[in-house]
Amino acid sequence: MNAAQTTQIRMEDQRTTFSRDGAPDLVVAAGARGIAQRLFRHDPPTPGEIEHAIDTVEDALAATGLRHAARGDLLARDPRLHALLGLQAAGERATRDEVEERFQRLALTALSQPGLAAGLQPGTLAAAELLILRECMHHLGFEGVVHAPPAP
């Protein structure tokens, strides 16, 4: 992992924030708890609820004016994100393809294929976190997510 190419992600209730040393924070006006409470009425969310949430996150990403570019890895310090991605130790990494695979399992679970839910974190908050992470990685160009311990 190249620290110069790493951006820290913080999932907050009503927004998602990306931080890099020496650069202003990028704030995306879509947060996991807000998405889960406003848009997900079912657990797992229905396909329509997922699609509405994707549209909401895409609109928030577009509002930042940031275009897709190679941005390296995301650094995740939040234990919830570690659990969401199955990252158990500092330095472990989930690729964009692995995040996409988890998201596709969530989407198929929403289509009444509950056997695919194994290994996914339960609940609408986890579903919203996974959806936001997936959209940010795809639309902004992040390549992976790296487990980092909480800041001292």
Image (cartoon, helix red, strand yellow):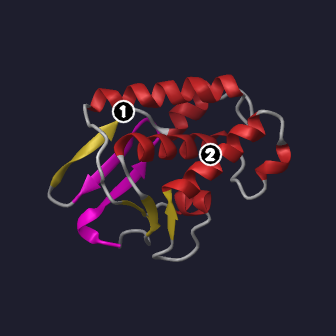
Name the disc covering residue 61, or none. Answer: 1
14 in the magenta segment: yes
Along the line of sight, the residue nearer the viewer: 141 or 121:
141
Q: Residue at x 52, y 40 (%)?
A: 32
Q: Position of residue 53 (x, y in %)?
A: 55, 28
Q: Quadrant of residue 98?
A: bottom right
CA–CA distance in space, label 1 to label 2: 18 Å
Amino acid at pointer 2:
Phe
Q: Quadrant of the C terminus?
A: bottom left
Residue 122: % across, % down? 72, 49
The answer to whether 149 appears left or right of 27 in the picture is: right
The span shown in magenta is: 1-20
Quarter that holds the N terminus: bottom left
Residue 123: in sight, yes or no? no
Across and down, in percent, residue 41 comes to 70, 26
Residue 91 included in the magenta stretch of the image: no
Residue in the image at 39% along x and 39% along y: 139
Q: In this figure, which residue is indicated by the disc labeled 2?
A: 103
